[in-house]
Image (tube, rainbow, N blue to C red):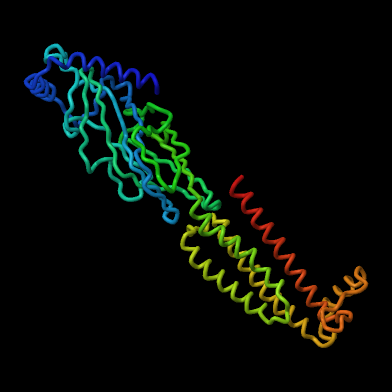
Amino acid sequence: MKLWNIGLLLQLLNITNIVHAQTSADLKALHTDLFNNYKKEVIPIENTSKPLEIGIAFYLTSLNSFNEVEESISVTGALYTNWTDPDLKWNSTMYGNVAFTVIYSDSVWLPSMFLVNRVDSMNPVGDDVKFPAMISYTGQVAYNTGGILNAKCLTDISKFPFDRQTCTLVFIPWGFHANLLTLNSLSDKALLSFFTPHSDWKLEDYSSRTAIYNMHSLFYVELTIKREPLYFTIMIIVPTLLFSLLNPLVFVLPVESGERVSLSVTLLLSYTIFLTLASASIPTSSKPMSVLLIVMIAMIGISGTIVIGTIVSAKYFYLENDKNLGYIMNYFIERLNKRKKSVEQIDENNELLKKAKYGSAVVDSLIFYGTYIAIILIFFSYFSFVLF
């Protein structure tokens, strides 16, 4: 890459030293003589036993958007290509030391580069815009083409919004087998000389390479982008965490207040409405599914469990005797009473707590501590998965 840049710089320095003598008449004469018998339809191969070698590099100018649902990425970029055309050589001293000239690209042979995994149309890159080409007296042609490129990109949103996406742009000189034309990458990285950063995605890697596949020479540009998670963390993850930590607190309220069931149902409905609104911001994909969405659904399950627990607890609290406690609750109470000899009553007489009310306290404790342990484990597993 460095040697290529140094060589190009030296060539430009030599050009600036000799172009001072050229005139408009020299350029016109050069164009007349140069393209008199030139056939742009013929591939410029001087030795048919060797393929035409084309140097290629990719300039990434902007990352426009990434669509998880459609599994596509949109970028703006340009392909730089250069090759040697033996029919476009001239003696610079015969034309007033003209060392190079710039012409419209429709006058010379060009390699039609296609984006293989394009999602909108199957046209050559830059086909809708005519870019100029620069020709050196040595016969070297330098040509840039580009535009907005929409490519297919397999998506993995399991770690949303801490996900990374790797997309590959595959370019091919369609119609030319590798024995006629081969691509040589001028750099192992995409060039970012004119790159404008994106506010939602951070560009982490931008490698490029060439390879032979199915008798064609291919040019690969691999882009790895990382989502900026701050917005989704504040708007989705933090409210989900707050809802989940707030929900079990309904068991702190006294049963006599009569507000437990109404508060737990209100929290369940509130979280359900929040999930409906937040799901619009979560990419919809089944393979793989976002783990954050699974966490939010699990929180609804826990909230529903809390509603059931408050109803069961209120039922046990207001029982007049222990006949309707059931076998399982009686078993739990007897096991707990073996460890705790006496339980103080909270009524006016300060007598021993009735079995029914003690059963209500057992339900409260089991669900209160059980849901908090489940919530902590769920969020610990989620952050361990997405951050490591």
Rendered view: 380 above or below 212: below
Relative to 103, 379 lies left or right: right
Name the foreground residue: 289 vs 388: 388
Residue at the far front: name it.
Answer: 348
Q: Please state the horizontal and vertical placement of residue 21, each as a whole percent of the image.
A: 12, 14
Q: Please state the horizontal and vertical placement of residue 135, each as a whole percent of the image.
A: 21, 24
Q: If the image is split into quadrants, where does the N terminus sit?
A: top left
In which quarter of the view is residue 212 placed?
top left
Residue at the far bottom: name it.
Answer: 320
Rendered view: 229 above or below 216: below
Residue at the far left: name it.
Answer: 25
Viewer can see residue 211:
no
Viewer can see residue 118:
yes
Q: If the image is split into quadrants, where does the C terminus sit?
A: top right
Relative to 60, 259 lies left or right: right
In which quarter of the view is residue 329 placed?
bottom right
Name the foreground residue: 360 vs 45: 360
Rendered view: 304 above or below 295: below
Q: Please state the horizontal and vertical placement of residue 76, each as a whole percent of the image.
A: 33, 42
Q: Please state the horizontal and vertical placement of residue 229, each as a whole percent of the image.
A: 51, 50
Name the foreground residue: 233 vs 185: 233
Relative to 309, 296 lies left or right: left
Which residue does the image show at 63% across and 79% down from the upper left?
Answer: 262
* Count of marks, rendered view: 0
